[in-house]
Image (cartoon, helix red, strand yellow):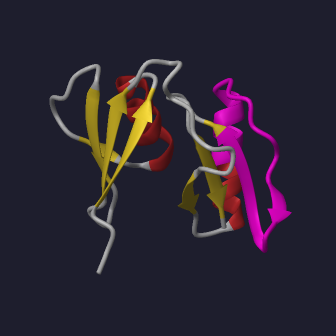
Amino acid sequence: MRLNHLNLTVTDAIEARQFLEKYFGLRGTEGGNRGFQVLFDDNDLVLTLIKGRADEVKYPGTFHVGFIQPSEGHVDEINQRLRADGYEVDAPARLHGSWTFYFRAPGGFTIEVLS
């Protein structure tokens, strides 16, 4: 068995899609609209992004989407790219046995990058 799809409610579906394509290599589909976007990962997981009102996009404090990287160097590289592009991210640290950092992504959800 494998996970087939996951839906995230976001404040801006297009902005969230473009962000996930740029930093995490997800592939978006042609079409869609401001309220609905579809992305795929390398294992054919389908990630749908559905626009909700800003006051509706609220996730529990511990909710996050994790992107595992092949090495600590990759974690550092993503962290540096995000900082260079103006995103507020803490430096990676050793937590729960991983080299990791968390940050709020465009769209209103939290991402963990780890190795």
| Residue 12 image point, x, y percent | 42, 22
69 or 10, nearer to the observer: 10
Which quarter of the rendered picture does the C terminus lie within? bottom right
The single residue placed furthest to the left in the displayed view is 31
Residue 95 highlighted magenta (yes or no): yes
- Residue 90 percent across, percent down from the top left: 80, 41
Looking at the image, residue 83 lies above or below residue 47: above
Q: What is the count of numbered marks?
A: 0
Q: Position of residue 28 (x, y in %)?
A: 27, 40
Residue displayed at 63% across by 47% down:
78
Vertical relation: 24 (above or below) 56: below
Q: Who's the residue at 27% across and 34% down the image? A: 37
- Residue depicted at x 29% and y 81%: 1
Q: Is residue 109 above or below residue 88?
A: below
Instruction: Kindly give the residue lying farthest to the bottom in the view shown.
Output: 1
Q: Position of residue 35 (x, y in %)?
A: 28, 23
Q: Is residue 65 magenta?
A: no
Relative to 108, is 9 on the left or the right?
A: left
- Which residues lie in the magenta part? 78-103
- The residue sitting at 66% across, 49% down in the picture is 77
With 26 as the anchor, is 4 left or right in this view?
A: left
Looking at the image, which is closer to me, 25 or 48?
48
The quarter holding residue 16 reads top left
